[in-house]
Amino acid sequence: MDTDTSQSKCTKWSHLNKYFKETLHSDAYSDIHPSQLSEFNKCGKKRNNIDDNPAAYKQLKLDEVGKISKKLNQTEFDKANIELVVSTVSPFSLIEHPGFIKYCKLTSNRVPASRRNFMRDIVSEYNDMTASLKDELSQVNFVCITADCWSVFHRSYMGFTVHWLNQTTLERTSKGLACRRMYGKHTYDNIAEMIDKVLSEFNIQNKTSLIVTDNAANFVKAFRYSTLI
């Protein structure tokens, strides 16, 4: 029941309780609805707690932030910062920004890891995630790949995603497979070499039934003159 509604109901019952007591004899009042008398009296009393958890309805002050919520240890705190930087595609320099350091001290009373340690932890998380994906792909019989390449700030990249169907539920699973730096021009032989390296790295050369790309001439030629699939 909503808190405001509950308080309003109890207030109305309190007024009714007072009215009956003033207008009726006390004995007659007790005999009218004896089964509900205890409920009237209970609602007329001042409630000391709201659902036995007053903190859940109290708005926190600025200096109380981080004191009532769950305490994070340093490992959990560092992992949360990694997730923040990676999921928002923020620069690693954020971890050393004075404003971010002040925010961490205020909310968690902790100081973020140094940039060097932070990048080391990200590499460790990446290796764990890659190992987990390889293990997951080892249990799949067939996969589909998407690939695309692009240039930004005079640098070229090639990205891959992998998709497969769960053999039991037939639900589709999609994962980011890789994002690699490409050196040189986007020629068909460079593209074919990059695709072959990624498929070999995840040991899915013989499992890839389809590779989806755009219809650019370099991709068309890469599949025409290679044995990728």
Image: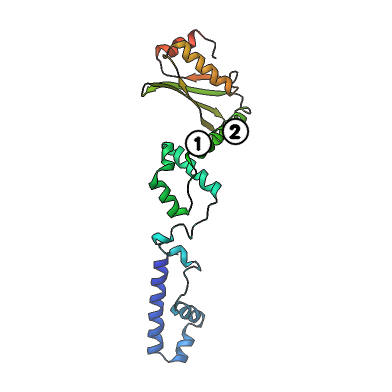
Q: Which residue is mark 1?
A: 119
Give the residue displayed 41% in from the left and 46% down from the top: 100
Front: mark 2 or 1: 1
Residue 176 or residue 201, whichever sits in front = 201
Earlier along the polypeptide chain: callout 2 or callout 1?
1
Give percent across and percent down for residue 60. 41, 61
Residue at disc 2, secondary structure: helix
Residue at disc 1, secondary structure: helix
**Can you say which quadrant of the picture contains the N terminus?**
bottom left
In the image, is residue 221 above or below residue 197?
A: above
**Can you say which quadrant of the picture contains the C terminus?**
top right
Residue 141 or residue 1, whichever sits in front = 141
Give percent across and percent down for residue 116. 50, 37
Give percent across and percent down for residue 171. 54, 33
In the image, is residue 38 above or below residue 153?
A: below
Q: Which residue is mark 2?
A: 132
**Position of residue 14 in the picture relative to residue 170 (left or right):** left
**Position of residue 163 in the picture relative to residue 64 (left or right):** right
In the image, is residue 85 above or below residue 153?
A: below
Cβ–Cβ below 8 Å for labels 2 and 1?
no
> What kind of residue is marked 2?
Ser
In the image, is residue 152 above or below residue 80?
A: above
Give percent across and percent down for residue 188. 45, 11
Give the residue displayed 41% in from the left and 71% down from the top: 7
